[in-house]
Structure formats: structure tokens, C-alpha cells
Image (tube, rainbow, N blue to C red):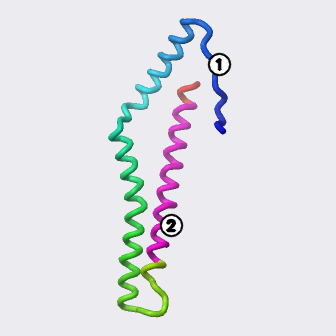
Amino acid sequence: MSDKIPSPPPKTLSEAIESQTERKLRSQRRGDRSLWFGFGMFGLIGWAVAVPTLIGALLGMWLDKHYGGTRSWTLALLVAGLVLGCAQAWHWISEEEKKIRKEERNDDE
């Protein structure tokens, strides 16, 4: 459920126009976030997960080649890289959400 309580519908035409104008002004202050902006963010998050995963796999392959044993370093470091990448992406998304919420609070004041 949302923490935000929905505001009551505008009662008069002037209130409706004022509310629509405020929404447009907030949108203009945030800037134009197009479809390409969304794809860019999706790609950024993908790289944040993929790079640590690949580094972990490559390091694991090197360790298996030079210090082979009964355990697979490749698998272990691949999983570790994946976990690290997901944690990094989660942190980045959380920070962006905090910025968006802060902007919304500032716009409401």
C-alpha cells in the first residue's frame, strides 16, 4: 500500500486548472525523461550486475587453472560476483528513489 494519502478531487474549475498547472511545472523542473532515458537506466543497472559477475567468473577460472582442487572457484566467484552486482544495483536504485521522494516533498511544500 502507498504511504501517500490521495488528495480529494478539485472542487472548482480554478482548483482543477491550478492542480494541473502545478503538475506540469513539477514535470518541467524534473526534466524530460523519455523512453531512451528508461532504457539507459535499465542498461546501467544491467552493467552494474554483469561486470562484477564476469570479473568473478574470470578470476575463478584463473584460480581453477592455477590452483585447481576439488572445489570450483569459478562457480563460487561467479555467484559472489552476482550477489555483489545485485547489491550494488539495489543500492543505486534505493539512492535514486530517495532523490525522487525528496524532490516530490520539496515540490509539495
| Residue 92: percent from left, percent from top | 48, 52
Residue ID for mark 2:
83
Task: Check disc 2 and give the amino acid type.
Answer: Val
Instruction: State which quarter of the image contains the N terminus.
Output: top right
| Residue 29: percent from left, percent from top | 42, 27
- Residue 30 lies in what quarter of the image? top left
Identified at 49% across, 22% down, the residue is: 23
77 or 31, which lies in front? Answer: 77
What label does residue 8 carry, if any?
Answer: 1
Crowding around mark 2 (Cα neighbors within 10 Å: few <14, some 14 to 19, many 20+) is some
Task: Check disc 1 and give the amino acid type.
Answer: Pro
In this rendering, is residue 18 above or below 43?
Answer: above
- Residue 67 lies in what quarter of the image? bottom left
| Residue 78: percent from left, percent from top | 44, 74
88 or 6, which lies in front? Answer: 6
In this rendering, would 38 be left or right of 8?
left
Label 1 element class:
loop
Q: Main secondary structure of the magenta part?
A: helix
Q: Is residue 92 magenta?
A: yes
Magenta stretch in the rendered image: 77-105
In this rendering, is residue 75 above or below 51?
Answer: below
Q: Is residue 69 magenta?
A: no
In this rendering, would 62 be left or right of 79?
left
Residue most extreme to the left: 36
Label 2 element class:
helix
In this rendering, is residue 27 above or below 52?
Answer: above
Instruction: State which quarter of the image contains the C terminus.
Output: top right
Between discs 2 and 1, the one toward the N terminus? 1
| Residue 93: percent from left, percent from top | 49, 49
